[in-house]
Amino acid sequence: MNIKVLGKGCKKCNMLEEHAKQAVEALGVEATFEKVTDINDIAEYGVMRTPALVVDGEVLIAGKVPKASKLKELLKK
């Protein structure tokens, strides 16, 4: 699983990354994490509000920071 956190590195971006890591750990799956901070790269995903979470090329979350339990549900699918 390839997970990208899109955002400029703000507190919410870091929180989203931490929640995603907690969800991955709880699921017991392997994942690589990458931070995407360049605004042009973020725009390529069609994301207008950050932070955003991209999993295997698909934008799952944009503009909010769900709890790890919610991310766990999304990552199971």
Image (spheres, rainbow, N blue to C red):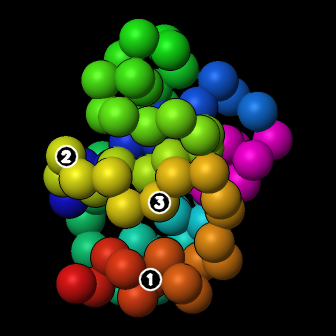
Which residue is label 3 attached to? Answer: 61
On the image, the x and y values in percent for residue 69 come to 57, 87
Which residue is label 1 attached to? Answer: 72
Is 12 on the left or on the right of 73, as rendered? right
Residue 9: which quarter of the image? top right
Q: Nearer the viewer, mark 3 or mark 1?
A: 3
Viewer-proximal residue among 54 and 45: 45
Which residue is label 2 attached to? Answer: 57
Q: What kind of secondary structure does the magenta stretch mostly adopt?
A: helix
Residue 7: which quarter of the image? top right
Q: Give the amino acid at mark 1.
A: Lys
- Please tell me which residue is depicted at 33% across the width and 52% down the height of the picture: 59
Q: Is residue 46 magenta?
A: no
Residue 28 visible, this angle? no
On the image, the x and y values in percent for residue 51 come to 60, 44
Is 53 on the left or on the right of 51, as rendered? left
Q: Secondary structure at mark 2?
A: loop
Q: Are marks 3 and 2 in contact (CB under 8 Å)?
A: no
Label 3 crowd (10 A; few <14 / some 14-19 / many >=20): many
Residue 46 visible, this angle? yes
In the image, farthest residue toward the right: 11
- Please tell me which residue is depicted at 50% across the width and 14% down the height of the picture: 39
Is 37 on the left or on the right of 42, as rendered? right
Q: CA distance from mark 3 to mark 1?
A: 13 Å
- Please tell me which residue is depicted at 30% across the width and 23% down the height of the picture: 44
Q: Quadrant of the N terminus?
A: bottom left
Q: CA distance from mark 3 to mark 2?
A: 12 Å
Label 1 crowd (10 A; few <14 / some 14-19 / many >=20): many
Q: CA distance from mark 1 to mark 2?
A: 17 Å
